[in-house]
Structures are given as C-alpha cells and as structure tokens.
Image (cartoon, helix red, strand yellow):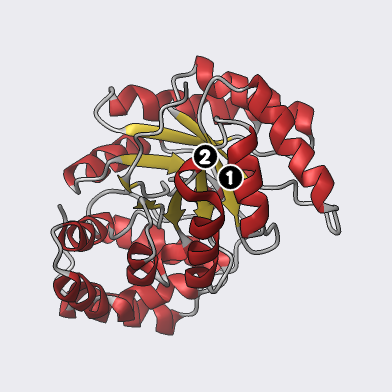
Amino acid sequence: MPDQSFSGVFPILQMPFDAAGRILFEDLRSEVEYAIRGGVHGVGIAYGSEVNKLDDHERDEVLSAVVDQAGGRIKVVMNTGAPSTVQTIHYTRVAKVLGADAVMIAPPLIAGIPMPLVRQHFIDVAEFSELPIFMQDMAGAAMPPALLAELSKENENLCYAKIETLPTPNRFTETAELAGDSISMFGGANGVFFIEELRRGAKGTMQGIALCDIVRKTWDHFQAGDEIAAESLWNHYQPLVKLYTLAEGQLYWVAKEILRRRGVFTEAFPRLPAVKPDAGIYRELATLLERLGVAAI
C-alpha cells in the first residue's frame, strides 16, 4: 500500500552550481535546512532543479545528499521521468534504494506521442514501483484530467498528480470530479493559481523554493479557514512571485539570486545554456526584496 499521506508545502529545490557548472553540495545541504526552517512538509528534485541537466552519477549524488540532510524530518520526492519506460523504471528503482519517499514522472517528452502510449508508460512504471508516484501534468507534456483519473484507479501507486498545465483551476475541478478520492492533487507552476487550487481541493503545492516560508504561511492561513488572510498574504508578494513567470532559463537565475540574497546559496548560477535576465530585472528584484521585507530565515 503506497503512502497516501502526503500533503502541504513541497517546494522544488534549486540546484546550486558554480560558474563552471559544478554542483555546490554544501549549498545544497544549506538549501534543505533553509526549507526545513521555512516549515515545508517535503522537497522535490525535479525539472525546476535542472535534474535534466545532471548525469546519472550526479543524480544519485544529489538525491543521496538531500535524503541524508533531510534525515527523515521531511519527505523527499525525486523526478525519475525519462524518454523511455526502461529508463524511467531504472531511475525509479534507484530512487527507492537511495531513500526517496516518492517519485514524480511526466509523460515522455516526445512530440506527438499518442495518449494510449502515455497511459501504458505510466502503468508499466507503476507495476515496478515500490514508491507512490506523482503524475506530472505540465506544459509540453499535458495529462488530461480523464487520463489522470483513469490511471489513479488502475494502479494504487499512481495516487498523486502535480497539475501545472495552465490554467490549472478548471483542471483541478475536472480531475477531482473524475478521480474522487483515488488521487491527491498538488499545484505547481510557481503558484500562479495557488489560492484557486486550494479552493478546488489541492492537497499540497510544489512551487519554487525561494519563498517557501511565505508559501507555508499562506498554506497555514488557508488550512485554518481564513481564506481572506491567505489570499491577502499571497497577493502581497505577487510582484516578486511574478518574476518566476520569466522563461525557464531566466527563472533559474532569479530564483538562485533570491536564495543567495537570503543567505542560502554562496553563488547563483544555473547550468548553461540558460539565458540570463537583463540588469533591469536584477534591479527590480533587489527593490522588491527590500520593499517586501524578504530576509534570511
């Protein structure tokens, strides 16, 4: 029986690199501690962590370091998606051995892949998995609500969904109607529709980590029944959250700069290629951090 208890704030880690693209493992451990201080319930290693830019050895080193630093205090979710079913099963088995609590898988990023093949991919992986699986519905690899519901009922390991194809609110509503209690829905997309997803039954959120403490406070207000306080707090930080809507490569630069300014990272580089924001974005970021009082935690 898979662990179906996951709920709450599960931010996706940023991967700390130096200017040459080497992983800074001390910064990675610092980031896990930062997340725990921020009150998160778990962390994820996924596309937002540039996991697709890591070789297999690096993947294992990163997951091992995160699991070790977490020390059972929070859950760890590892992205094990790959272009082939064989690769995905392999990565999923390795994640189990290295101590992950769950895995996350998006459909293979193959242009025009038919939905029956996507469905079979998930069923085949789930049959070999000893961990609960987050099915990732995202831009470029969408999973319709009907498919999420069907899969969740066919294999109990397929019990979570990270829904990110925009706009997400209608997808949350439809998935909940079709899947019922067989699936737990998590939001993502850096919280573009965070409040709306909560209103539609989200069991958690998997946003970027840079503002995880603010995400947790928003979550707590909503769970306490104070939707107005939750929405007000989240809206207050929207000018800063909006910088996460930059194209993917630029987003990495911005998120890592926030973490550097909050004392988590010593350097703020993505692994190249990744288009760097212009100087104006950095000026706006500095102004917003000061105006909104975003400090180290």
- Comparing marks 2 and 1, which lies closer to the viewer? 1
Question: Residue 92: x percent and y percent?
Answer: 61, 26
Q: Is residue 97 above or below residue 41?
A: above
Question: Residue 277: x percent and y percent?
Answer: 50, 74
Given residues 220 and 244, the one toward you in this image is 220
> What residue is shown with label 2?
22
Dot 2 surroundings within 10 Å: few (below 14), some, or many (20 or more)?
some
Q: Is residue 269 above or below residue 95?
A: below
Question: Which residue lies most toward the top here?
Answer: 97
Question: Residue 252: x percent and y percent?
Answer: 48, 60
Q: Is residue 118 above or below residue 1?
A: below
Secondary element at tag 1: strand
Horizontal side of residue 163 vs 192, given as left or right:
right
Q: Amino acid at mark 2?
A: Arg
> What residue is shown with label 1?
135
Residue at image coords 19%, 57%: 223
Q: Say whether residue 188 is visible.
A: yes
